[in-house]
Amino acid sequence: MPELHPLSDLSDDALDWQVLLHSGSASAADQARYQRWCQLSPAHAEAAREAEALWADIGQTNAAQIFVAEPAPRKRRWPLAIAASAVLAVAGIIGWQQVPVWTSDYHTGIGQRQVITLADGSRVTLNSGSALSLAFSDSERKVVLKAGEALFETASDLRPFVVEAGGEPVQGREAVFSVRRLASGPSVVLAEGEARVGTQAVAVANDARALTAWQRGKLIFNGKPLGQVLSELERYQHGRILISDHTLAALEVSGVFDLDEPEALLRTLEQRYNLKITYLPWLAVVH
C-alpha cells in the first residue's frame, strides 16, 4: 500500500528550528547555531531541507501551534458577554461533544487516536472524537465516517474504497488521504494516489504532511489566527475555549504542537503573549 512517511524526531527538531527562525526574534547567533546543526550529519541536512520546504507550504494550513513575536501590552477585559457565553457553553457542552459511538464499529474519545487494520489490508487512523462503521461487500469496500476525522491508507483491491461522510462519497484508489466530516460535507486531504469526491478529482495537497500530522500527534500551523488555533485545539480536549475579543482572535501564531500534551498550548500562550486564561468547569476563557 502507499506509505505516508511520518515526521521523525529529527524532522520535529528541524521544524522547531523553522519556528524559531521565523518568529521574528531569532538572533545572528541562532542563525549560526542552526547552520551548525544542519552540518551535524547528512540526515540533519536532509531534515532541514524538508522542514524548510514544509514550512513554505503550510502558510494556509488549518492545523495549529505556537510562536510569534510578543504583542504589545494590552488592557485585560472580561466583558459581560463573555460571562453569558460561558454559561451557555457549559450548559451545552455535553451535547456539543457527543460522538455517535454506540452504533459504530470503531470510535475514539476526546484526545485519543486509534490505528485500525482492515480485512483487506487497508489501514485507518482515527483522530480525536471520531467514529466509523464498516460495510464491506463483494462489490465495494465502504466505510461510513459518522463523526470526526480519519486517515486512510488503502490497499490494492479490485473493489473501490468508498468513504461516506455526509454529502458526496469519497473514493480513493491506492491512496493515502484524510476525510473530516463537516456539516457542509466531507473535507478531504490527498497525500498520495488518486481520490474523488463524487465525480470531481482531488489534487494532491502540497501541505498534506502538515495537514495530516495529527496522525503522529502533532499540530502544525504557520501564521494562523489565534481563534482558528483554539478552535482546532478544542477537538483534542474536553470543554470549550472562548476568546474575549475579536482583536485577540486575530493574533497570528505559528509553530508545532504536541497533541499528547494539549494543556501545554494554553500554558505557553498565557506565558508568552501577555494573556490571561480563566478556567471554569468545561470552559477556558482567553482574555
Image (tube, rainbow, N blue to C red):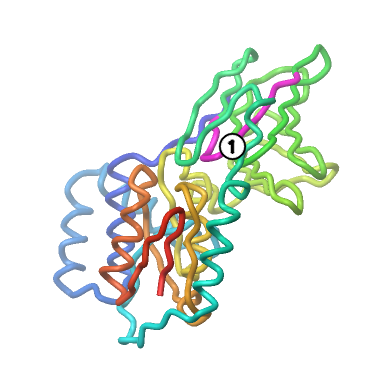
Is 173 in front, or is 258? Answer: 258
The three-letter code of the residue at mark 1 reads: Ser
Q: Secondary structure at mark 1?
A: loop
Is 189 in front, or is 246? Answer: 246
Image position, residue 66 (x, y; %): 36, 63
User: What is the quadrant of the C terminus in the image?
Assistant: bottom left
| Circle 1 Cα neighbour tier, 10 Å, few/some/many (<14 / 14–19 / ≥20) | many
Image position, residue 145 (x, y; %): 69, 34
**Is residue 101 depicted above or below 201 in this figure?**
above
Magenta: main secondary structure: strand
Is 134 in front, or is 283? Answer: 283
Residue beneath the point at 37% across and 50% down: 262
Q: Quadrant of residue 253?
A: bottom left
Residue beneath the point at 54% across and 77% down: 81
**Is residue 110 depicted above or below 74 in this figure?**
above
Residue beneath the point at 41% across and 83% down: 77
Q: Quadrant of residue 157?
A: top right
**Is residue 223 depicted above or below 176 in this figure?**
below
Is 248 in front, or is 124? Answer: 248
Q: How many marks?
A: 1
Identify residue for label 1: 130
Image position, residue 169 (x, y; %): 80, 38
User: What is the quadrant of the N terminus in the image?
Assistant: top right
Image position, residue 205 (x, y; %): 60, 51
22 to the left or right of 193: left
Extent of the magenta region: 125-135
Q: Does the stretch in magenta take in 201? A: no
Q: Does the stretch in magenta take in 129? A: yes
232 to the left or right of 272: right
181 to the left or right of 111: right
251 to the left or right of 147: left
